[in-house]
Image: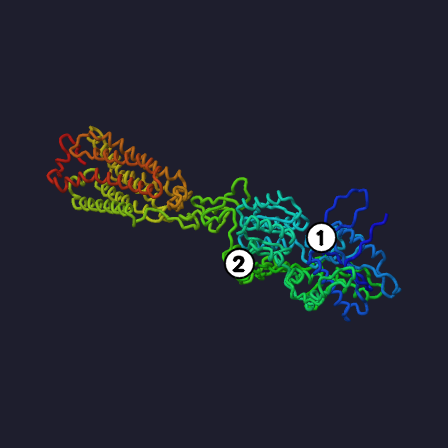
Amino acid sequence: MTRDPEYPQLFKDGDIMLGGIFAFHSSWEDRQHTYTRKPVPLPCISLNFRGFQYAQAMLFAIEEINNSTGILPGISLGYKIYDVCGSIARGVRVALALANDNAEVFAPFEASCTRTAHMQAIMGESSSSPSMAIATVIGPFYIPLISHFATCACLSDKTKYPSFLRTIPSDYYQSRALAQLVKNFGWTWVGAIRTNDDYGNNGMTTFMETAQQLGICLEYSVSVFRTDTPDKIQNIIDIIKTSTSKVIVAFLSHLDMDMVLHKLAYHNMTGYQWVGSESWISDSQTAAMDRHHILDGAIGLSIPKAHVSGMREFMLDVKPLNSSSIKLECTGNEDVTEVQNTFTDMSLMPIFYNIYKGVYAVAHALHNILSCNKTCDNRILQHIKSIWFKTKERDEVYFNENGDPPAKYEIINWQPTENGIVDFVTVGLYDASLPANKQLKLQNKSLVWAQNSQQVPLSVCSEKCPLGTRKVLQKGKPVCCYDCLRCAEGEISNITDSITCVRCHPEFWSNERRDACIKKVEEFLSYEEIMGALLTAASLFGTFMTAVVALIFFTYRQTPVVRANNSELSFLLLFSLTLCFLCSLTFIGRPSEWSCMLRHTAFGITFVLCISCVLGKTIVVLMAFRATLPGSDVMKWFGPAQQKLSVLGFTLIQVIICILWLTISPPFPFKNFKIFKNKIILECALGSAVGFWAVLGYIGLLAMLCFILAFLARKLPDNFNEAKFITFSMLIFCAVWITFIPAYVSSPGKFSVAVEIFAILASSFGLLICIFIPKCYIILLKPERNTKKNMMGKGGPKSL
């Protein structure tokens, strides 16, 4: 059984035929098939003026080419234009009908002029899904299918659709441009609604991929189609109502947008910021339907505005069909330009221009074939793919390897006027051929947002984290939903929405706001602070006291009290005490290399010198009383020379220990960051702990030896037994340095230095007061006791 023939709605014979597939109707009447008789042709309903406009644009281009002498001279173009009523199945049937007219291979026109003209290319379809079906069917025939409005990125796949080309950019670029536009306004929490077909699904997939890369999160993504049930539509409305995002990206065809707009108006859902695709954003019919101002302030991408001289006049110059079978309700003399409806609306001129460019692309390809010799490749598809020309409006037309034109868009903003008409204001441009950072360019124009607001709407899941905080993701939610956690001490964040806090350099610390690192306070025992000043004063006072005692002793150097028990050792002891008081000053002030090496070594040597003198005096006391025993000659073995040598020997051992310490691992200035978080403790590191404790240990050893000997000599008969005072002074000395160790270890920072200075001063004052003050008391206040007889006493030693 043969199929019923498909008859075109518009037909004109010519030397070369072009096909056109448009939707003069937007729907069809659904009928149940009984399968008992042959189905009747599909009845179309709902007149669609846009389809007529598209056909008119094609006719204008053909007429202009036929009247031109510069392209295809002497050759006329004909056309067969079919109405597919928006049906994919009908579109495939029509495409096959057109392909059957092209059974023979194209041949030069020198052949018989009586032959039948063949179909060379097809213009259409307007939507992606029908175009995919048609391109799949006619692809094996390599008949070019040139669409003016099918934008699905999937159609760029030449393995599936080898003969498909288009004069509108691919949605691959539009989807990425929409994501960049959303990001530009700081919207990171958006909703998305798409047409449930190849156009919407593929476009939204690319948008979501790009959005994820740009840090944009989708709260929801729903699909809709104009034939969906009321329950499904209501479910989508409920999802939008309960959402927290205030921006909706709508990748919808104009028909689906019109249906969604009707439902939104019914529920009075205003206040949302809409971001639209090119299918509806510049559609005046959609704007006219928006009587509740739901889409006011919408922003989106549109095909660049275009003007084709003569097209508007041609499209409006229509006459009724002259047929006796049609009852006319008009005279044919009416002026269509005075009518305000979809057909007279020229807001879709950029789309009409796409059809115009498609027809001219075919004409230029045919012209090139007919102009070349017989060795030229006569496959029109290959010539169209490699075509390059300029239209009369000076716009370039060419296709890339995927059959796509260069991607350029205008950014459109819906700005309502006082009379209620929406003005489509161009506020920016997008050019995919430019570098990534220059593709999106917004002009310095005031934009209108939802509800006529002048402020950019805020649509985020979480507010930006301020300086001094970092983002912590909320469990089970997208990355755009987070809490702001304050940076820990010692860490900062100096940018908003920081994902991490940066730890400050060890010499810096975070300020109170945690947004900047400030230099830590360097702490050391200084002369300017109270504690340092007091310790300095005590050191100088001790030095002054020692000098006064030395002056007294020098003045009364010939008296028995001074001469008793080796006055030379007494002066040497006073000198060493002066050094002990002064060495404490090396512990005050900012640590440096020389002060760190000097403070411990000077302390160790001067104290050993001091203890050595005391030890010498103690030994003298013991030896002196043993010399009173019959037959004893011990004093000749420990006379003045031996006493000086013993002091020198004991001190030399400490000098050797200090030299080894300074040679092997000397003390050095050190910045301690561990004791306090917000301070730097400037201190002297020991270098070698063994050297430090060897110095202290040696001092302690001498002090204990001196204490033991003095203790043994405390009860020797003498009116002025110095051993008693040495014992008491050594008791103070040992007590001070025994308590020093735990206090030193447990004291933080500069207080450990203060403890060490206090120990030095306390032990020095103990020696000075216990050994010399009693003698000064006798010299100055009790001169009657400062006699040799009183010094010797009954039964005392013969001579001191």
323 to the left or right of 734? right
The image shows residue 455 at horizontal and vertical percentages of: 49, 56
Q: Quadrant of residue 570?
A: top left
Amino acid on which disc 1 is placed: Ile
Which sits in the foreground, 711 or 555?
711
First of labels 1, 2 by sequence position: 1
Kindly identify which residue carries mark 1. Answer: 45
Report helix, strand or loop for mark 1: strand
Crowding at dot 2, Cα within 10 Å, few <14 / some 14-19 / many 20+, comes out as many
- Secondary element type, mark 2: loop
Q: What residue sits right under mark 2 in the picture?
A: 448
Q: Residue 178 occupies which quadrant of the picture?
A: bottom right
Along the viewing direction, whichever of 601 and 314 lies nearer the viewer: 314
Other-residue count near label 1 (Cα within 10 Å), few / some / many at <14 / 14–19 / ≥20: few
Residue found at the very far left of the displayed protein: 784
Q: Position of residue 463 (x, y in %)?
A: 49, 48
Q: Is residue 15 visible?
A: yes
x 37%, y 45%: residue: 683
The chosen color scheme is rainbow
- Residue 660 in view (yes/no): no
Side (left or right) of 739 relative to 68: left
